[in-house]
Amino acid sequence: MKLKSLIIISIFLSSKWINADPNLPFEFNSSVNRVIEKLETDGVINGLHRHTRPYKRSDIAKIVEIAKKQIKSKKLRPAKIHLQLLQKLENQLQLGPNNSDSTEKFQTRSLISIRSHAESSKISPSYQQALRYQLGQKMIIYQELEVDKLFNRTKSATKYPTQGSTAEKRINQWQGNYTADFKRAYLDIPFTKGTNLIIGRNQIFWGTGRRHAVGISDNSPPFDLIFISSDFSSVRGTAFISKLDRMWHQEKRRYLATRYLSGHRLDWRLNDRIELGISEIVLYGGDARGPEWYYLNPILPYYASQFNANTEKEGLTRNDNIMLILEGAIRPIKGLRIYGELFVDDFSYVGRGDPNDFAFLTGIIWNNLLKSQQLSLVSEYARVNRWTYTHLVEENQYTHFGSIIGHRIGNDADQLYLEANYWLNADTKLALF
């Protein structure tokens, strides 16, 4: 069992410093993510599906506009820091009416920042460049380049740690331990109001955690995928299919296994205070195995599909890695958020000595300790059992290019994270973590 904790005093000025936040799209860098978190926890903005990331730009624009109307009508009386943060969010994401005109076709943004990663004690410059082309109010073409120092002197990656085997390489070292990578490149195609199809490379983050999730996090490289999302009143449904890296199968017969990851999810906002989510994920592969059609169906349960597909008499036994995520968050009062998630990798219901493979994460955000609402305390604990993220079939390990798709700490580990923040203003925050 490992217990990790880190205490550092940092001063964050504007968006020049980037810490360990979920790897959201470029226009939602870590400083913007923290602004969204605080405004939502304090009840200034509502209606966002917080646990299904990355967020949609249109969703942020919608809830900001609602908050502004409530403030104007005196239905909402935010503190001074909330008004500053709301304005910061609107400015950084260019959500104003002059920037939402459908005639604006092309946008580009660049950012030079100072970064450090979990396995490296040094900080180094990083560069990001994003290109966004919108065809009217329809299709969006998005591409994001990242130049970052992801390798240390031992030639191992610091951002995507090696925690398993792979037959391929996602990122190669460039000059001075730097890498250049198109971390996102996709087409976003709207079908109907609230329904979008994304084809290309993108990151997925499913869960309640602030920094990491036990289900799908940003610990592994982004996925090359087909992704669909649709809203049904207060419920958001999402599903995807992704091709993972190939892996050598060594037992009995050696072959290069192709691997796939599919997932579907429901994120339900019961009201502005309670949010629940359930996800089912399957990782499968084999010798020259192609994608299974029943795993492409967004509303068909994976577990039942695998069970019915088994034909042992014909020598076709499916032992795919099917996982379940349950999560929830509650905001009993404004300024207080309690959240948790449970990852079920393998549940033994026969009781024959087969251990259960679980992981869980729980946390609390407390923002209303001071009348000014400028102080925020955070506590988050994660625990991953011994055999979680593993599988009897080699190629069905829960990894992508050797990095665990779930929580960064890996299996047979736990982590306690504590953080205190004091917002001096919208651009300056004192942090102890």
Image: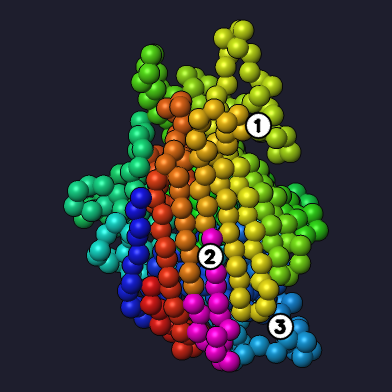
Q: Which mark is residue 268?
A: none
Residue most extreme to the top: 314
Label 3 amino acid? Answer: Lys
Label 1 amino acid? Answer: Tyr
Label pair 2/1, CB-CB below 8 angstroms = no
Q: Which mark is residue 303?
A: 1
Q: Is residue 291 left or right of residue 113?
A: right
Q: How is the image coloured?
A: rainbow
Q: Which class describes the residues within 10 Å of circle 1: few (<14), some (14-19), or many (20+)?
A: some
Res. 19 image quadrant = bottom left
Extent of the magenta region: 362-377
Front one among 92 and 217: 217
Residue at label 3?
Answer: 68
User: Was residue 214 drawn as part of the magenta stretch in this picture?
Assistant: no
Front one among 213 and 4: 4
109 w.r.t. 318: above or below: below
User: Percent position (x, y) of residue 177?
Assistant: 24, 53
Q: Nearer the viewer, mark 2 or mark 1?
A: 2
Is residue 62 in view?
Answer: no
Residue at label 2?
Answer: 363
**Helix, strand or loop under label 3:** helix
**Helix, strand or loop under label 1:** helix
**Helix, strand or loop under label 2:** strand
The Cα–Cα distance between marks 3 and 1, rounded to whole angstroms, is 45 Å
The Cα–Cα distance between marks 2 and 1, rounded to whole angstroms, is 29 Å
The Cα–Cα distance between marks 2 and 3, rounded to whole angstroms, is 30 Å
